Structure formats: C-alpha cells, structure tokens
Image (cartoon, rainbow, N blue to C red):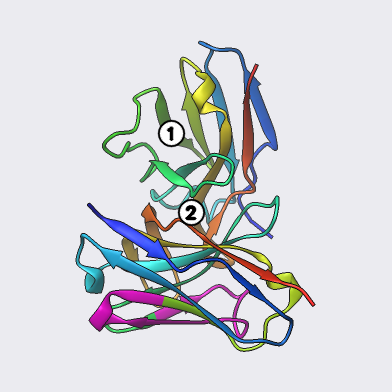
Amino acid sequence: EMQLVQSGAEVKKPGESLRISCKASGYSFATSWVGWVRQMPGKGLEWMGIIYPGDSRIIVSPSFQGQVTISVDKSISTAYLQWSSLQASDTAVYYCARQVGFCTSATCFGAFDVWGQGTMVSVSS
Amino acid sequence: QSALTQPASVSGSPGQSITISCTGTSSDVDGYKYVSWYQQHPDKAPKIMIYDVSHRPSGVSNRFSGSKSGDTASLTISGLQAEDEADYYCSSYTSNSPYAFGTGTRVTVL
C-alpha cells in the first residue's frame, strides 16, 4: 500500500526554526515528485512547491520562494519542509503528497494521488 | 491568490445531481488536459476524485465525473449522498504559478 506518513504536530514560537518530515512507503520514492501543500485555518489549499527525489530538482511557488526550504533524503525515502524563522502567519496544516505526472523546469502537470495525514504547525508567542 | 475560480458553495438534495465549476483563463484550464479534483472532509487530508479532466482513480464512485469546456472544468456529482458533503478543489497548471488549486467549493447536502 502506497503511504505517506508525516511527522507530528508542532508548537513553536516566532523566530524559531522547524523541519517537518514526510516518509514514503509502498512505491518507488525516487521516481515520483513529492509536493507540499499549505492549508491555513479555515482556508483553502495552497501549492507550495515540489521536489523530485531522484535528483533533488525543486520547483517552488513564487508565493513561497525564499520562505521555506524543500529537501529530501532519498536513502530513507523522506521529504522535508523547513523554516529558518517561523512567523505567526505560518500557522497552518501542511500536507505532503505524491504527484503522478511530470514537471518541466517551471511547471507541473498531473495530480496528487497519495496524501500524508497532515502536520499541524502552530506558531505563537 | 488562486487563478482558478470556483463557486463558494453548492447544495442539493439527496439523489439530485450537482455541478461544480472551475474557471481559469485560456492559458490555464483551457490549454491543458491535467485538471484534477479533490474532496476534503473536515479535518481530513484531501482525496483525489478525478485526474486528467475526466479519469476516475480506482475506488472512486462512478457518481463522480469530470469534464472541460473552453476555460471551465466541471465536476458533477450524481445521486448526491450525505457522505458527499465536503469541500471540493480543482487544480491545474496556471499561467502565473507552476501549479495551483482552485478557491474551493463547500458542498452541502440538504
């Protein structure tokens, strides 16, 4: 069974750093793009960025450029989303998801067929 | 801000059919065949319902169907059931983002 299992909920203060994880199983991790999606409280889904584990190619939404870092450790089938200095506005649920399809250097075509359970990140002083 | 616009809410009675629209621009939904639709129940992860405009993944009820005409994609739910009450999002490539989700539609079963 294809599965993405995310790390647990986090409670942080503004200015702190954070890395959340997404561990894949049941499929070839290296050959499928893995994306990150933000959902702020009571709001819709926002596409943040995507990474190809095979060669660590990354595409980031202009809205999130410079705000987060996306990375991967292929040896343990795990993708990461990282902040160096959290803000209260980063409070949200973050989902990872596998994309079936393809990406060019700047655009992605396809759908997210497997989703993680979500990681709630709360940032408050 | 999403370039894919959906109605904020759609409602219907059990057994009825409803349609949710997803409108982009000619360079977004119209130009590509990769529109997909997701269902999200409260406090749950999204679930794919339709991919590549009109294809249903294994396990998704055939009451869900997708289509596209011009710059508008649509998701139709036929034989509406109480369990269909959820939020629905379209997604696609857009001209100003590598990828985007629609604004989302709350489906209410009356």
Name the spot of residue B103 as percent of width and height, x first.
Answer: 64, 48
User: Can you tell which quarter of the image residue A103 is in?
Assistant: bottom left
Can residue B110 be seen at all in this image of the molecule? yes
Amino acid type for the residue under numbered disc 1: Ser
User: Can you tell which quarter of the image residue A65 is in?
Assistant: bottom right
Question: Residue A23 got which mark?
Answer: none
Circle 1 SS class: strand
- Which of these two is toward me, A120 or A100? A120
User: Can you tell which quarter of the image residue A7 is in?
Assistant: bottom left
Name the spot of residue A22 as percent of width and height, x first.
Answer: 40, 69
- Chain letter of mark 1 equals B
Q: Which residues are magenta?
A: A58-79
The verdict on a common chain for dots 2 and 1 is yes
Q: Is residue A87 left or right of residue B105?
A: right
Q: What residue is pinned by disc 1?
A: B67
Q: Is residue A17 left or right of residue B48?
A: right
